[in-house]
Image (spheres, helix red, strand yellow):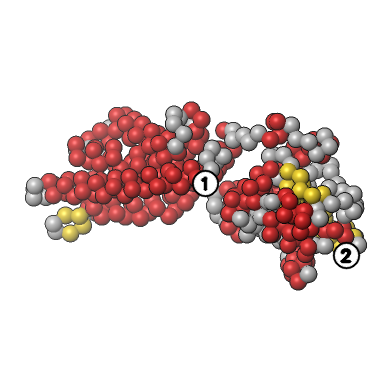
Amino acid sequence: MADLKFIKMNIEKNRPAWVTGTITTEIGAIYSVSPDLTRVDYWEHLKCRISAFRNNYIVNPGLYAVGVPDKNSDVLVSANYKLSFDAFRKALKGLNVWILVLDTKGINVWCAAGKGTFGTDELVRIISVTRLDRVVDHRRIIVPQLGAPGISAHKTTKATGFKVCYGPVRAEDIGAYIAAGYQATRDMRTVKFPLVDRLILTPMEINPAMKKYYPWYALIILTIFGLQPGGILFMDAISAGLPFLLLGLISVIAGALVTPVLLPFIPFRSFAVKGWITGILAVFLSTTYISMLGHLSKVLLIAAYLFFPLASSYIALQFTGASTFTGMSGVKKELKIGIPLYISGVAVSLILLLIYKLGEWRVL
């Protein structure tokens, strides 16, 4: 009960535009939400897509109404990640249903199910806290199919009396699923990952790579190439380091954009291998068709062919968690093999750069 009071106080204090009013029930007023998204919602989605504030983009957990639901209306379960919640309420336009929002710590249904926050314990807790058994007469809740790994149907039923039905993969199929008597077609059960979905996710990989890693990479490269026996020379750093700075940008694009977009067409299942393939092609095309890169010495060329495909591979590997292509075991297997190779590749690349500098200083 304390949780529910906190939720209501929080919403009353800063009532969001998507809360349109309340519906009176036996346990009191339940907030009703609009299925129509506003420009503010879409602007927030855009910022969220580029990782601006996605970790804090949350909805207060609890029970919400869409349309004018009553005691016979269906209860649908969702996560408290605002992006997921918005997609869900938008898909429910024209329906009269309840939305039971779990506290998944701002994580989407699929990822939260894997991490355990979209789980049986939280579902049981929120059913109890919202006193759902007094809001509806039936004992049936619909859980998204992608949340199935985290929800034990028989444990939920035993603890609450509510039967768990696993709904379709996509929220837009909810209406057809309910109309068909809670039966999902094969197409509703199929997990798809089309080009548009893959493209939408790429900013979440590009942005962190450019913000967290590239500035440090640029600083290291400029320091190495500008370092001379008499100190660090700015012009040497720029002229000699620029090709490697450019190759760094190209490897990010190859790993974070090209690999996800061409995912189904790049051979092999491993994301690390897919990223390495796009990376080595990017280095080949860059050094072949960009005159500035064609003048790299043999030592630097070897270092470039070694380091940058591995960088693309590592970045592409991060996309595994955003895709439906592999599971947790697949990610762990790739990391187990990939991490030693990445560390070894970086070490050899640094040795090659050291050999290049010693040659430049006429020590070797």
Q: CA distance from mark 1 to mark 2?
A: 42 Å
Residue 181: where, in percent of width, then height?
84, 37
Question: What residue sits right under mark 1 in the picture?
Answer: 328
Say which of marks 1 and 2 sits in front: 1
Q: Is residue 266 above or below residue 13?
A: above
Residue 239: where, in percent of width, then height?
25, 45
Identify which residue is drawn at 44% across, 31% down: 268
Residue 130: where, in percent of width, then height?
80, 62
Q: Earlier in the sequence, mark 1 or mark 2?
A: 2
- The residue type indicated by label 1 comes to Met
Local secondary structure at mark 2: strand
The crowd level at tag 1 (other Cα within 10 Å; few <14, some 14-19, many 20+) is: few
Image position of 184 (left or right of 218): right
Identify which residue is drawn at 76% across, 59% down: 159
The numbered disc on residue 28 is: 2
- The residue type indicated by label 2 comes to Gly
Identify which residue is drawn at 69% across, 59% down: 122
Q: Is residue 160 above or below residue 12?
A: above
The numbered disc on residue 105 is: none
Residue extending furthest bottom? 2
